[in-house]
Image: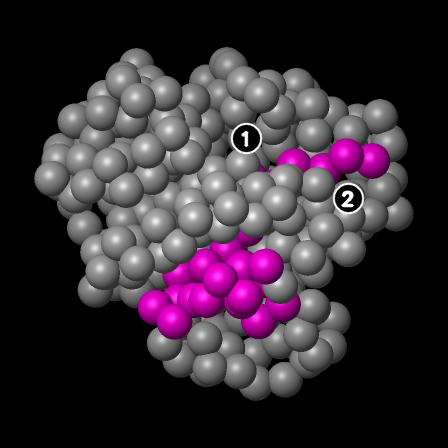
Amino acid sequence: MNLIDLQVNGYANVDFSSPSLTFQQLQKACLVLRQKGTDAFLATIVSSPLSVYERNIPLIIKGIETDPLIASMIIGFHLEGPFISPLDGPRGAHDPACVIAGDVSVMKRLITLCGPYLKMITIAPEVARIEQIIEMATDHSVIVSMGHTLASPQQIEEAVEKGARCVTHLGNGISAMLDRTDNPIHTFLSIPGLYIMLIADGHHLPLPFIKMVIRTCGTSHTIITSDSAPLGSMPPGEYTSLGGKVVLESDGKLHIPSLGCLAGSSACLSECADFLLENRIASPSELDEMCFETPKALLDL
């Protein structure tokens, strides 16, 4: 089975958002992910200081342009933030100091740094001046995905009208307590044509929710992603990551006890596919579509 992962934050103790990321670490993450079955992925950088973007993006581009392994694995960038909700809950594990409202100058800098390698950006439709960010992204053929948000139906619909086409890890990056009917999840599912990304690692979403999304959106608009964290493939234990204590449980659950939230996934995409197959959520042909053909179509590869 071919696998394209649209959200990989790092792997094998390698963090793509770390201010100390090295070329050798980048090679290591790509090698281990290839060994685990991932064919290609978007290197994902979470909400970070501008200095991290200015350091890590050129380093990763150098890898893509000079190293055959990295070039074969990394399609481009998924910038998850920094234009997301600052609220506890929808912000998730992102550093609140790095989350900002829509800033045209910052977006211009990110576009310049990434060049043609910027493939996707996750934004929250409710943040100030986000319309300008969406327009700039779409003008440069960047996929705008909505996530880490508590947007109203009107804000979501306006973002879609401006060009947003996708939803980042539906059901995650949102408050634990929501209105039972009036909430962003239902709004996203009510809009035809949106591509919906799901983390199917066994910890982020219950099986009935995954079934519902696939039945509602179809495999042609459902994308399975890992949201792999830097601690993926590491042994269980306590680690320092994301600026604090992170716990990796023996069952693979990765969480921040002090915040009561998950810290990405310890799984890779092949493990997510295996989980869905073992639980009879999807057939091999359906998984091939959601893990390869649909992300390939969204990226226009």
Q: Residue sitting at 30 percent across and 58 percent down?
A: 55
| Quadrant of the image containing the N terminus | top right
The answer to which image quadrant residue 97 occupies is: bottom left
According to the picture, the residue beneath numbered tag 2 turns out to be: 273
Vertical position of residue 213 compared to residue 109: above or below: above
Residue interval drawn in magenta: 1-27
| Residue 178 image point, x, y percent | 41, 47
Numbered label attached to residue 196: 1
Is the residue marked by circle 1 packed among few (<14), some (14-19), or many (20+) residues within 10 Å?
Answer: many
Which picture quadrant has residue 93? Answer: bottom left
Q: Amino acid at mark 1?
A: Ile
**What residue sits 42% from the left and 45% below the top?**
61
Expressed as whole percent of the image width and height from the top left, the position of residue 247 reads: 56, 79
**3D distance between C-alphas at marks 1 and 2:** 16 Å
Q: Between residues 177 and 175, which one lies in front from this camera angle? A: 175
Between label 1 and label 2, give the one nearer the viewer: 2
Task: Give me the residue at 69% from left, 23% from top.
Answer: 293
- Which is more toward the observer, 195 or 188? 195
Relative vertical location of residue 219 with respect to residue 97 in this rendering, above or below? above
